[in-house]
């Protein structure tokens, strides 16, 4: 894909998930994409090789919650197991007013995150190189209004959630489908977790299913 094709692909993909991306946002997403592809030649940031797939399954996938969540879910968000910055850093580019904390134990990946943050001159974003279960607030960060993850097992998040998410806050999981019985069985062990809702959709330009599953911390 050349620059013009990338621009149009981001713009149309944004429309398909309910976002009207402006030129400056697409510019930053494209700069992020270019660096991801460049760094990926030397280290494993993503297993995807085609630019089209990286845009769909990393960038556009990461942005799917924005039309549903940007109002009423606070300003302090935390992305756990962010890897190369998905979904948290991509969301931060589109919603710069958010205070975003990115948690990732791999030092090479957090070096990449710092590089992108500096390149795009992003503010109110911090990176913690550690595992969620090893972080003990308030020493390292304030409690989040919303915790989201594409990578961590739900059990790991539920076990640590009360330490990292404020009362009334939200947990958001990216899943392919919502298996109601499995989730109900799991949350029986966590009395402070209440199912809020699930949002089902398909990723742009393909039929890959995506379900956003939300829980409230009581």
Image: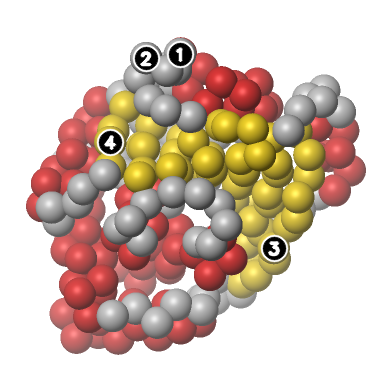
Whether tag 3 and tag 1 are in contact, CB under 8 A, the answer is no
* Numbered disc in front, either 4 or 3: 4
Question: Above or below — where is 24 with respect to 45?
Answer: below
Residue 126 numbered tag? 4
Indicate which disc, 4 or 2, sits on the residue closer to the N terminus: 4
Quadrant of res 206: bottom right
Indicate which disc, 2 or 3, sits on the residue closer to the N terminus: 2
* Numbered disc in front, either 2 or 1: 2
Question: Above or below — where is 87 with respect to 67?
Answer: above
* Residue drawn at the location 22% of the way across and 80% of the way down: 23
Whether tag 2 and tag 1 are in contact, CB under 8 A, the answer is yes
Mark 3 = which residue? 199
Question: Above or below — where is 149 with respect to 62?
Answer: above
Indicate which disc, 1 or 4, sits on the residue closer to the N terminus: 4
Q: Is 209 on the left or on the right of 103, as rendered? A: right
Q: Secondary structure at mark 4?
A: strand
* Residue drawn at the location 45% of the way across and 58% of the way down: 62
Quadrant of res 114: top left
The front one of 199 and 150 is 199
Q: Secondary structure at mark 3?
A: strand
Q: CA distance from mark 4 to mark 3?
A: 28 Å
Mark 1 = which residue? 136
* Mark 4: few/some/many CA within 10 Å (<14, 14-19, 20+): some
Indicate which disc, 4 or 3, sits on the residue closer to the N terminus: 4
Q: CA distance from mark 2 to mark 3?
A: 34 Å
Mark 2 = which residue? 139
Q: Is 161 on the left or on the right of 183, as rendered? A: left
Q: Secondary structure at mark 2?
A: loop
């Amino acid at each position: 894909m050349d620059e013009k094709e990338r621009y149009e692909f981001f713009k149309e993909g944004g429309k398909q998930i309910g976002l009207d991306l402006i030129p400056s946002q697409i510019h930053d997403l494209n700069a992020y994409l270019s660096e991801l592809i460049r760094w990926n030649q030397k280290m494993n940031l993503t297993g995807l090789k085609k630019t089209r797939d990286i845009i769909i399954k990393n960038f556009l996938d990461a942005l799917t919650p924005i039309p549903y969540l940007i109002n009423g879910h606070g300003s302090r968000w935390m992305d756990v197991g962010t890897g190369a910055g998905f979904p948290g850093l991509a969301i931060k580019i589109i919603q710069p007013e958010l205070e975003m904390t990115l948690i990732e134990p791999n030092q090479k990946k957090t070096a990449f995150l710092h590089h992108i943050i500096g390149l795009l001159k992003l503010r109110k974003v911090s990176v913690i190189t550690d595992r969620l279960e090893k972080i003990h607030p308030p020493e390292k960060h304030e409690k989040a209004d919303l915790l989201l993850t594409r990578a961590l097992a739900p059990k790991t998040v539920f076990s640590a959630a009360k330490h990292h998410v404020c009362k009334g806050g939200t947990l958001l999981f990216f899943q392919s489908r919502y298996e109601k019985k499995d989730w109900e069985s799991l949350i029986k062990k966590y009395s402070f977790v209440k199912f809020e809702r699930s949002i089902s959709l398909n990723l742009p330009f393909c039929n890959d299913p995506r379900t956003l599953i939300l829980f409230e911390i009581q």
